[in-house]
Image (spheres, helix red, strand yellow):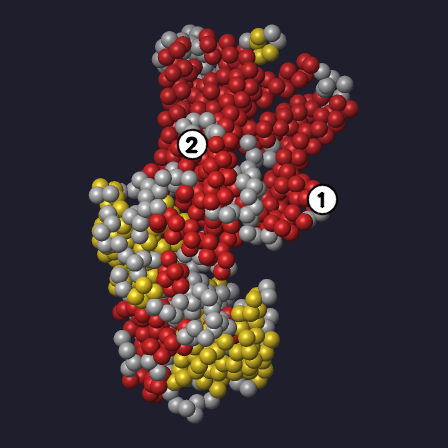
Amino acid sequence: MTTTESQVSSSEAAPIRLKMEGISKSFGGVAALREVDFELKEGEVHGLVGENGAGKSTMMKIIAGVHTGYTGRMLLDGKQVHFHSARDALDAGIGMVHQELSIIPDLSVAENVYLGKQPTKNGVVDWKAMREGAKRQLQMLGINVDPRETMGSLPIGLQQLIELARVLYSGARIIILDEPTSALSPPEVRRLFEVLRGVKASGRSIVFISHFLDDILEVSDTVTIFRNGRRVETKPVPQINKSWVIEQMIGRGHEGLEETYTGQIALDSKPQAPVVLSANGLSSGRAFTDISLQVRAGEVLGIYGFMGCGQLELARTLFGKLKPEAGGLVIDGKPVKFKNTAQARRAGIAFVPESRRSMLFYHEPVFKNVSISSLGRISRLWLKPAVERSIADKQAKALNIRPANVKALLGSLSGGNQQKVALAKWLAHPTKVLVLSEPTRGMDVGAKDDVVKIVRGLRDQGMAVVVVSAEPETVLSLADRIVVMKKGRIVQEFASETISKDRLLEAA
Amino acid sequence: MNTQTMAAGSTSARTKSFLREQMRNIAPFVTLIALVVFFAVASPSFLTMDNLGNILTNISITGIMAVGLTFVILCAEIDLSFAAIANATGIAVAYFTAQESYVNVANIPLSGGMAIVLAMIGCLILGCINALGMTKIGIPSFIMTLAMMQIAAGICALLVRGQILYAVPREVSFLGTESIGGVPWIVLVLALFLAVGHLVLTYTRFGRYVYMVGGNREAAEFSGVNVKLILGSVMVISAFCAGTSGMLGVAYFGSAQQDEFNGFLLDAISAVVVGGTSLFGGRGGIGNTIIGLCVLGVLNNGLDHVQIDSFLKILIRGLILLIALIINVYAQNLRAQQMQSTE
């Protein structure tokens, strides 16, 4: 997919519908947007790119009335406005389709399209009018679907289009789409783009946020790039290409961000080390397809891909939380099939999910959090709290967990220390393969460094580690070998070579 | 908020936070004291050794059921079938015992030991069906045990066919009706169940898993705990406790018949919840259940000692349960708030 003919249609003379001037917004002292200007013309598709945390979503949520406290001016059709809710924004003709769809799966298509605004006759819902109206609405977008069908039974791509139809039906003249293609298959993406072109032709404006640069470049007329809460560039699409966009997104180091790896990273894979875990042709529904990979002892395998590329589900499958529909796992040469996570644990697999909340017990003391995964080794029947505490003490010292008191409630620890506890529980247990999902997300630089050191230490002791992340820095700072996933498939592998962040982004 | 600001917090703030945390333990205890004081003042016959024995005997059957139910509620599940399972087990043990000639039921007389074993196997099977329905098929416990309640009631109906059975095995009637040194055996059985329940929950690996599964089921699963095995086990434990109390109950009442234990469903749930075990799982325990049982026992017994409309008693019990529920949910919210502020 590369630049195609459709962009040329946007005319320079189109009137400006929305103008944002000097928008600043901070969350608890951390600046998310600094003095950002943004313009949206009538009848254009405006692509928005930037790394996680660059501020693009914050900007769009201000426009859609989700964030209400900000400084700066917002002009809609030349008049200054300030929305106090998403309802306000919708009434003014601005609708947003969020990444998490707000459809109701148990209701019919027609009911979803008319949600909250059902046509009535004599005080009761006019089902016939609703069905016919919904059918008409959807057909205008080129969607042929029976409006009586249950929403949840349709593929995600169709659900997304129907949600788009609802936003359009509600009278929106400006539509903001947040990562609309991440869950879609290529034919579904093509269909979405056709629909967007039709919407554009009717004079409405679209903001298209995406990590998929190919998609952005294909459908957008104009692209704006955000970096570190600032707008760095806005250019019409015919003048730009993918590598230029990536360069703008990363910023070639002059921002001085410590964790930004712009230089070359030498991958130190170990092709001779014994394979500990291998996956053969794993497939799971819409999440991922035909994944084969091998993890060697003393090696960190990085799995990189954008949000929603199926990497989170893959990690859960390795740990027996999800069952694959096809394919299998082999540990130390023996095929295994996990019925539950307890079997995976016993086979020597450890997993730390991306959200600490789903890993830790906040109202229990630290030592119970550490010992939970290895209780079976500490005791058969009777608990031995003294042993538990001494094991936890040892781990707390080794991982530099603060406070050092293992009787402290976990909820009283800082986020970085909680993450270390999540790691510590698997170190008290004989682990062969450690699967980490987003191990450094949302951590400050110091805590990130600690985690990197811990993981490297484990690798050097001969543990096989799998790091799954949507942040290229995380993968680059940890991995010895990197596979890149895209829309549920492995598309590329980097081993024994030097790699940089832009090559990684380009592959995904 | 980080640990430093926590530590720097004033003593009063820490006391407040401790009280918040202990709200679910303190409130039931204060309720119990208040009730005892009230009834002691209102009626001279309330605070006597005789009456204390009465209260303990009266809560025994509820108490044995409540031990099993405590496990279930700690896992953030519910069992609505235990009273019906108790009833079915009680009827089964009588069904396998030789009855007097005037009892018009085509039963199957066996030896006392056999009758007990068969009845207990029966109740364990019902518990296993609960467990399998929940963990293998994925039926929510509320619905699964609602169905089981009906199934167990159906078993009762089929066995007794509207009649009443009187005789139970000698071992059962001994435990259900006799005393040792003035203490009824049934109270000692309750004490045994409470003690074992407490030991298992507090000092064994299984008990720890129960609390962890109830505290954060997802985290338990991601820590490699076999969550389904734990959930299934607590359902079987609940059925076992129900079966035991059903047999002793039949002996205690002197008869086995349809719908005999219906009132115990609400009583045992009340006891566990009034005691302060969290309906959201992970907090509470046998200690709470003991307090809850005492509150319920004192209330039921005390209301008999004061001049009060017996129909009003039902209403008062309902109100007490409502207040306990409010405290239960309120304590949970307090903790959730605290959790957020410390993150």
Q: Dividing the picture into quarters, in which one does residue A483 lie?
A: bottom left
Front residue of A242/A494: it is A494
- In this rendering, the answer to whether A398 lies above or below A82 is above
Residue at (43, 82) in percent of width and height: A234
> Which chain hosts label 1?
B
Q: Which mark is on residue A370? A: none
Q: Dividing the picture into quarters, in which one does residue A365 lie?
A: top right
Q: Dividing the picture into quarters, in which one does residue B144 lie?
A: top left
Q: Residues within 10 Å of mark 2 (few under 14, many from 20)?
A: many
Instruction: Please name the amino acid that badge 2 sits on.
Output: Ile
Secondary structure beneath disc 1? helix
Residue A263 picture location, percent across and down: 37, 69
Q: Quadrant of the N terminus of chain B?
A: bottom right
Instruction: Please name the amino acid that badge 1 sits on.
Output: Thr
Residue at (25, 49) in percent of width and height: A273
Asked whether, in this view, residue B319 is left or right of residue A276, the answer is: right
Q: Can the viewer see residue B226 in this picture?
A: yes
> Which chain hosts label 2?
A
Asked whether, in this view, residue A273 is left or right of residue A412, the answer is: left
Secondary structure beneath disc 2? helix
Front residue of A65/B299: it is A65
- Tell me if label 2 and label 1 are in contact, CB under 8 Å: no
Report the residue marked by disc 1.
B11
Report the residue marked by disc 2.
A378
- In this rendering, the answer to whether A31 lies above or below A386 is below
Residue A48 picture location, percent across and down: 42, 75
- In this rendering, the answer to whether A209 lies above or below A423 is below
Residue B174 picture location, percent across and down: 50, 9
Q: Residues within 10 Å of mark 1 (few under 14, many from 20)?
A: few
Residue at (52, 78) in percent of width and height: A36
